[in-house]
Image (cartoon, rainbow, N blue to C red):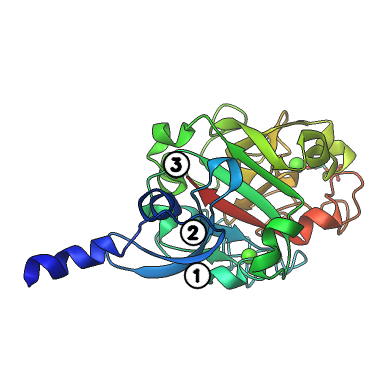
Amino acid sequence: NLSLSSKEPEYFSPRSCKELMERYEIEEDGLYYLTSPTGVKYQTYCDMTTAGGGWTLVASVHENNLYGKCTTGDRWSSQQGGSPNVPDGDGSWSNTVTFGNAEAATSDDFKNPGYYDITAENVAVWHVPNNERVGRWKLTSFLRYHTESKFLRSYGGNLYNLFKIFPVKNNAGSCPANHGPSVPVVYDAGDASFNHNLFGPHVRARTDPGFIMFRAINYEKAAMAICLGVKPKDCNTEHSCIGGSGYFPEGSPRQCGDFTGLDWSGYGTHVGWSASKQLIEAAVLIFYR
Ligand code: G3P
Ligand code: CA
Ligand code: CA
Ligand code: CA
């Protein structure tokens, strides 16, 4: 029966965790299978409880080697060295390349088809210590925050489309005129002041906590994708914003890599421009709802 079989895939194919919750009444956090409209079946984590639930994990940004500057594993910036010849690096923020898997999202980079296929309104971010097992993510996350303004509606419904509008590319604009949107966040673990304190004093003095900002641009016109719970007030954005273009002129290649210049004043020193070890040794998980 053609009509029945053509209904089946749709019936058994939730496209997002929100659909899984609303249509199939699933209420538990955990790993589930979703299907993209093109038929790609993939496993990801659903947060079914925070602020009403229905959050789909679409990506994780993991720094495997902060000493490696745009080297292997820097999939959210460039694995091709910091060079003006690759201004947008690996291009992961605005292409359909996928990598990693849900279970390893705190041990390696992860990007699934939901990143570009799901139409969403809000974003949530979790900071989870590296190498934590799935069942412990929520418990061990020291910082979790989400937007509530439905800002994605104005930018094409997901980050893939937002970063088409605001390319994560060297020389795409200048600071602060061409920064992407900054959106207030609500904290589900930690709070704005704890978030702020994960950065070194120079960064704290030059950022406001309680926001996610997208497509930051620094003094040298390098671009970063996401600022971690802060809105920069100056243009040294490379110490609080991650993911990035393939070329960071200042001190090249010292700021090139998935966690950018979060170690500018030393690895995990928490002085000057450097973030704490807690922050740099944790993966950044990105959810949509
Ligand atoms: O982003 C900080 C940099 O522009 C200045 O660094 O080492 O001269 O304080 P430094
Ligand atoms: Ca690196
Ligand atoms: Ca990485
Ligand atoms: Ca700088």
Disc 2 crowd rating (10 Å Cα; few below 14, some 14-19, many 20+) is: many
Q: Which amino acid does label 3 sit on?
A: Leu
Q: Is residue 34 above or below residue 207?
A: below
> Could you say where residue 53 lies in the image, as x and y percent from the top left?
53, 47
> Could you say where residue 116 lies in the image, as x and y percent from the top left?
40, 54
Q: Nearer the viewer, residue 166 or 280?
A: 280
> Which numbered circle lies on residue 235?
none
Residue behind mark 3: 162
Q: In this view, does 60 lie above or below 72?
A: above
Residue behind mark 1: 99
Would residue 269 appear left or right of 185 to someone viewing this image?
A: right
> Could you say where residue 218 lies in the image, as x and y percent from the top left?
66, 39
Q: Distance between the residues labelled 2 and 3?
A: 13 Å
Label 1 or label 2, whichever comes before in sequence order: 2
Disc 1 crowd rating (10 Å Cα; few below 14, some 14-19, many 20+) is: some
Query: In this view of the protein, can residue 169 be seen by the observer?
Result: no
Query: In this view of the protein, can residue 146 be seen by the observer?
Result: yes
> Could you tell me which quadrant the N terminus lies in?
bottom left
Residue behind mark 2: 92
| Disc 1 secondary structure class | loop
- Residue at (46%, 69%) from the top-left corner? 43
Tag 1 near tag 2, CB within 8 Å: yes
